[in-house]
Image: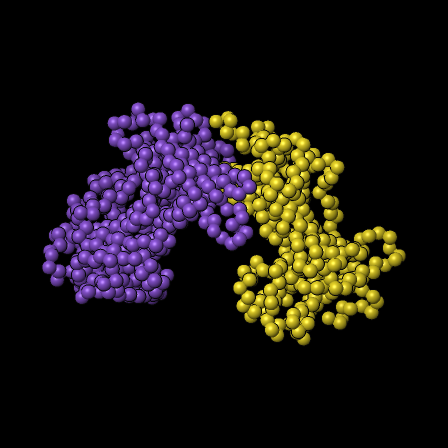
Amino acid sequence: MDSVHHDANPLFTAVSGPVRHLFQLLRCIAFATKAQVRITPEGIRFTVEESRVVQGVAFLEKSLFTSYNYAPPTSSQTDDTAVFQISLAALLETLQILLVNEIKDRWASRDPAYGGMMGALGRGGRPAAFGNRVLGMPGVCRLSYAAKGEPLCVVLEEGGVTTSCEMVTYEPEDQEEIPFQRDALTLKIIMRSTWLHDAVNELSSTSPSRLTMAASPSAPYLVLSSKGPLGSAAVEFSKDQQLLETFQVPKRTVNTYKYSLIKAATRAMSLASKVCIRGDEQGVLSLQFMIEVEDVGVHFIDFRFVPFLPEEGEDDLESDDEMS
Amino acid sequence: MPILSFSLNLDGVIRIHNAVQCLAKFSDTVSLEARSDRLTMSTLNSSKSAYASFALDSSTYFETYRYNDARLSDQSQEGPSRFTCQLYNKALSSVFKGRLGDMREKETAAERCEVAIQDDIDNTECRIVVKMICKHGVTKTYKLNYESTEIKHALFDRNSAKNKWRIDASVLRSFLEYFGTATEQLDMYAEDGRIAFTSYTEKVMHGREILKHPLETSVALDTLDFEEFSVEEKMHVAFSVKDFRAIVLHAETLKTNVQAYYSLPTKPIQLTYNENGVNCEFTLMTIGDYPGSSTKPAPISVRGSSATPTGGRPSRQASLQPTQSNTIRGVEEKQREAMPPPSQPASRSFPRAPQSQSGPGSFRPESLSQRTSRPSPPPPKASLDPESLFLPAEDDDRQWDETNYEDEEDILGWDASGNHKASALQKLQTAPEEASRYESLPAWPEDSDRRIAPTQRLAEIETLFSQG
């Protein structure tokens, strides 16, 4: 590994805290293989997109790392020195090397509080008596990126075992964000993410290709619906304070999205505690997931979806009742 | 006005889920039959060798149950009014999910369920509408498509079933796991105060290659373990292990006693249990043979049918004709292994045999007694066996051709008639009137009574060429 370390200061080095935080956050957006990475002084931003209609962004804040050094060359005034693409699948697999051991520690502790992987993100139970975490040797992950065009080095250290991986970086793509007009919101709903997750899963029963989201200021307030060969399904939410924490819908809006793309966000849905659903005038849907990370605070995963163009007569599903 | 509407509590939803899961192990469709006093979910498997039904009692199972048949006037002469339909099991099982998962699921679990079946001639959209009402006013509404169809129930005469036993489902469950997953048949044999349940697979050879290894697991129970036991001794009766497993697993969820009724091998066996307003009935076809040593003489027909001379466990090898080519035999054997013999041999009549006894078979096990003898596995007719993977060469090419849409209509008609055993074979069959339509065109000269029409009309071929 020494061969790749340049004598000059590398552009970026960081030492992570618990690896599983990185892993869990990155896994939320792993719906495509390649991710665009942008290193900034505040943190690392991973962007994944598919067909320019869905975009997932995970921002790994500085606070997730125990040390974080980003030294952009003062000479360059542009901000794209530390932008590159990387295989997200490969990165996740690498991080998993450390996780495997961690899970083994878990099982050793035989703590019934752990419901398998469900415990992976919190309620941190008691580790094994001589587990690495107790002995002050948790798995550590060092990331470094020497310069533009160099590989991203991931060095995993645990209990005296060092694993180093070099990951090829690719030329960045010109990535335009899916435009989202924050000043022209047509709906803003904050709710528990479990409910959204459940609703999206519920709709999968019809093996749909599209998901329709209808929000309106009067009942029915929020309806997710889909249609498939076996029938149709709709999940309707009432305006219960327990259910929809925030509900700002000035007028009725109906938009349709590709179901399989919404499905890409289900991992984030299941992990997050809350979700903020926003839609703008053009129907672009923004889902912002709040994920609580133990000891560190909250982190956000963003998804944006481009809607189908509205078609005549497909306005809404629930008006079928009146028609029939 | 819905023809049927009912509501359930969470417990009712879960029990429907269990029933639907059990039905899924038999077939991928579910038939519903609604009457004023009960709702029946049933299914018949594709080889028509197993039938499962769950009858939910209207007064005890449901919170509310209203059956309201507006069509009563048209149907009054047909006895009690009923509504029947069929839908995919997948659709039902995705609606009635087991919602008892972990804590996260509990929060979103349904509290109540309301179902309405809208079926009206004037209605543009007939659907089964299921509403799941959850906490905090979340409502999940499903509208399921269904096919309106007549459904078939297995008939079983308990009076003629002399053998019966009853046992706690958990006892059956406890020895279920000893039966290897690869085994196919389960044989019951009672002798000297014990009954042995033996799961077995027979060896299947293809040339020198062993396709299936023989495997046998036997569990013997003392007849005292049974709540009730009255079974003729020294008689082998065998049926599908897979079906038995599905039944026992479901019976165990109800923690109840399973009652079995059967008479003779090659006649159906019925397993049944009743709990909290659910009446479950399973009718399975059996194979096996009747021992010569028995005190009661078997009916001639059945005895003649049991071809195995040894009196041991039914062996299918014995009935195989040695003249057939190895290829066919391997396939034949495998197919037969996979399922008990259908209630009617070669139930789909093949066009070559116009005198063949019956059309697409309705499952009426008792009709077997009128029929003349039949070897428990029917002797394979390799070149003509409709079940065979290898179809005769001259039949074969038609199924690969472009669909002839006029023919297609005929095939769809068959499907609607409830014979959902749509196989490639049906496409090969030619309806008589269709054949006459093509009469002017050349038929197979050497085999004119088979009446396989040419695959395409000459006119179509011409247009194809002219386009090219």
Give the position of the N terminus of chain B as an image quadrant. Answer: top left
Q: For this rendering, which residue is in front, B42 or B278?
A: B278
Tell me where residue A19 sits by quadrant.
Answer: bottom right
Figure label count: 0
Left or right of B66: which side holds B97? Answer: right
The colour scheme applied to this rendered structure is by chain
Q: Where does residue B322 sit, x and y in percent of width and height?
A: 24, 59
* Residue at left offset 21%, top offset 41%: B357
Residue lying at the far right in this picture: please name it: A75
In this view, B267 is above or below A105: above
Q: Where does residue A276 sit, x and y in percent of width and height?
A: 66, 44
Q: Where does residue B50 sit, x and y in percent of width and height?
A: 30, 49
Q: Report whether residue B231 is seen.
A: yes
Q: Which chain is assigned yellow?
A: A
Q: Chain B appears what colour?
A: purple
In this view, B131 is above or below B234: above
Q: Where does residue B175 sit, x and y in percent of width and height?
A: 33, 63
Q: Report whether residue B338 is seen.
A: no
